Amino acid sequence: MEMLPLTLQVLVFPGLLFAAAAGLVTSWVDRMVTARVQMRVGPPFLQPFYDVVKLMIKETCVPAGGARALFLAAPLAGLAGAALASTIIWRAFLARGSGFSGDVIVLLYLLTLPALAVILGSFASRNPLASLGGSREMKLLLAYELPFVLAVLAVVARTGALRLEEILAAPAAATRPSGIIALVVAVLCMQAKLTLVPFDAPEAETELSGGAYIEYSGPPLAVFKLTRAMMLFTMPVFLVAVFGGGIRLGDGVLPAVAGVLKVVGLVVATILIRNTAPRVRIDQAVRFFWGPATLAALVATGLVFVGL
Amino acid sequence: MSFAVRALTRSLNVFHLGGSACNNCDIEILDALTPRYDVERFGLTLVGSVRHADLILLSGVFNTKAAIRARRIYEQAPKPVVVVAIGACACTGDIFRKSYNWDGPVDRYIPVDAYVAGCPPKPEAMLEAVVTLVKKLRGA
Amino acid sequence: MTRDDILARIKAELGDRVVDFHAKSDRRYYVEVGPDDVPGATRLIFEELGARFQIATGIDTPRAIEILYHWAFDRFGFVLTLRTKLDREKPEVDSVAGICTGTEWIEREMWELLGVKFRGHPDMRHLLLRDDWPAGKFPLRRDYVRADHA
């Protein structure tokens, strides 16, 4: 593991290529579960891969009068954020001593990069519908980041550690009441971070014709889609790392399989919520995240100090 | 046949471009996209923006005012793209071909790759057209 | 206020400007005035009596080009149509778009398809036909022939 230079780790394993491949598989799982819920057959296994390859062969249209450099660079920022986040998380699983103090905070920042990339790209598009999608994404970002950070804070407060490895070494947070409440809040925030129903107002296809992505085509759109797939995989892994004790590799087969099953369980829960809930308006979403969700996260943190 | 077109046939994003139709064809297109016919198993998904489109479905009679705008929208779709004309009005003008505001079927303005006749055509007919088009693109 | 009050008031205020007044049924009334009295009658029906504008109709008949404005009195359950007949050679009438904005687009449509000139219309341009439609060719006129132009 330590033999590979760091760049290769970021680009291949466990960074870009690994997260991309895992993300595409997770994306297929998402579409299959959705299909089964709707009593359909669903797409073939390689469908997400075909989608990305197909986008690479289409032409790239840059809107006239839009900010060309920002328009083309924004997707790459999101991709970088997701790839780096994946690298840091998996290095914590695989190699002891590879993290640094405060890497949880760095992860929280990196995981907001895909949303920021969408916002930047939408405003570089010079399209009123894209601006609407971007402004909704901004509001959503402001809304869910607060309870999300507070939920992670609950775990950090209990373990007293700002290092992912120390959080992994401590007993899993989700075994205690404070941890369970924090996990529920974090799952709802993850739903918004992944722009999935019920919190996908920025991307409302019926209202905004694609929202923030309306002007994107070809390879830049492929990068956005790939980033979304990577986040669909990386976010549950992050949640399992912080709340569920992570994927313990090197301790035997059973703990590792348990970790993987926890990730799969979170992914399926996300997909089921996505298929059964209606979309909420952006103001309802903001009110929800700044209201009940923040309150629950504060309660979880409070319970930590009481000893639960 | 190029890799590009083969990649395209495995993952087609469907975009519906209506030209003042009576909406019966639009209803049948909507039917075809419901879980009952499950077009996702062919790799077809519905998209909202023409910039994401690979397969443009034309429905309705495009009168002189709409045809010019439809051409502009077609030009905004990133190439390569395939176009299917759905319904008798889009294919030939049907009952509107003597109208004062009609200047020829829509393939005078937009190059059409497949025609699905019917008023309205059944979803099965539309799916057969798409599958035949895909097979033709792959086999040629 | 009842339906009969409204009808009585219209008859009283328009007086001898009414060319014809008849009822098709107890829910359908037709008032005909001359072209010059249309704005005044519209002001009475819309501004003072508070009717709701439904739609307008233009008809090309052998004797005249008729314009009908259909006004709904929803609370009283009837529709009152204001009819006027215009000369076929020179169909001109004052626009009522300044009185009721809802008539703006239908007057555009009546101009482009029948050739009726609405004097004082704020925004007279094509609605349904393409912008470079040849001038003077009105498709819904009886004597329109499609092969006449490009």
Image (cartoon, helix red, strand yellow):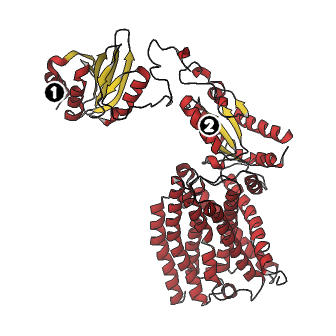
Disc 1 to disc 2, C-alpha distance: 56 Å
Name the residue carrying label 1: C5
Which residue lies under the disc numbered 2? Answer: B71
Extreme top residue here? C62
- Amino acid carrying mark 1 in the image: Asp
Horizontal placement of B129 versus C114: left or right? right
- Please state the chain letter of the residue tagged with numbered disc 2 in the rendered image: B
Q: Position of residue A153 (x, y in %)?
A: 56, 83
Mark 2 residue type: Arg
Question: Do the residues marked 1 and 2 share a common chain?
Answer: no
For the point 50% across and 62% down, which residue is it? A135
Q: Between A242 and B19, which is closer to the camera in this rendering?
A: B19
- The picture quadrant where one finds residue A62 is bottom right
Chain holding disc 1? C
**Label of residue A145 in the image:** none
Between marks 1 and 2 in the image, the one whose residue lies nearer the viewer: 2
Residue C90 seen: yes
| Vertical placement of residue C133 versus A33, above or below | above
Bin the neighbour count of mark 2 within 10 Å (Cα to Cα): few under 14, some 14-19, many 20 and up. Answer: some
Residue at image x 63%, y 45%?
B76
Residue A289 picture location, percent across and down: 49, 69
